[in-house]
Image: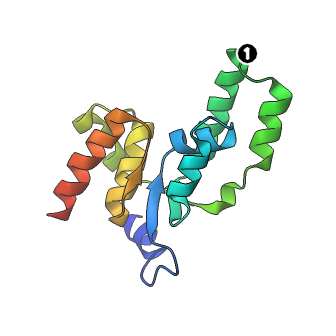
Amino acid sequence: MSHRVAETIAPPYGARPPAVVDASLLVAIVFGEPEAAQIEALLGPYELFAPTLLPFEVANAGLNKCRRRILDAAETGARLAAFDFASVRLCAIEPAAVFALAHRYALSTYDASYLWLAGELSVPLFTLDKTLAEAAQNYLQGSAS
């Protein structure tokens, strides 16, 4: 499976370089958080990739915002419907490899999915999660050498 994922972005990449984006950044964009414009500017130059779990994580964040009464259900649903998830290329992951990374870096398997994909594609990983960013720095630099 990993070879099929890598083959889907085989050079040439097109006009934009590839990068993996995690749910934390898209949650900020979808739900209009203060840093959304800055994040959109950061991600703009890139062709974005993520594991297939991304839309579910964003929807779950919306559910949590409803439960905490930050947004109501109608607004949350409207924001989710309005976001173009097709702007992110969703890729299958390898569960055993993701598990190994989660165990190695003390991450959730969800976070490790993004890390694995970035390593598999040899591309940067964008996240607002400090623990995931530190793991990515360690893992991706180690993968490059």
What residue did someone put label 1 on? 69
Residue most toward the top? Answer: 68
Relative to 43, say whether 61 is above or below.
above
Which residue does the image show at 73% across and 15% down from the upper left? 69
State the residue lying farthest toward the left. 145
The spot of residue 35 in percent (x, y) is 56, 39
Q: In which quadrant is the N terminus drawn? A: bottom left
Q: Position of residue 76 (x, y in %)?
A: 77, 32
Residue 28 seen: yes
Which of the two residues, 26 or 117, is positioned nearer the viewer here?
Answer: 26
Single out the residue that lies furthest toward the right.
Answer: 74
Q: Give percent across and percent down for residue 145.
A: 13, 63
Residue under the point 77% across and 40% down: 79
Q: Is residue 116 above or below residue 30?
A: below
Q: Is residue 38 above or below residue 86?
A: above
Residue 20 position, x and y percent, is 45, 56
In this image, 6 relative to 100: left or right?
A: right
Q: Amino acid at mark 1?
A: Arg
Position of residue 81 in the picture relative to residue 111 (left or right): right
Out of 50 and 126, give the one closest to the viewer: 126
Q: Please give the name of the residue rendered at 83% of the width and 39% of the height, measured from the top-left corner.
A: 78
Residue 82 in the figure: left or right of residue 110: right
Mark count: 1
Label 1: how many residues lie within 10 Å, few (<14), some (14-19) or many (20+)?
few
Q: Which residue is located at x 39 percent, y 32 percent?
A: 108
Q: How is the image coloured?
A: rainbow
In the figure, residue 106 lies in which quadrant? top left
Q: Secondary structure at mark 1?
A: loop
Is residue 100 something that shows in the picture?
Answer: no
Task: Establish if 63 lies above or below 128.
Answer: above
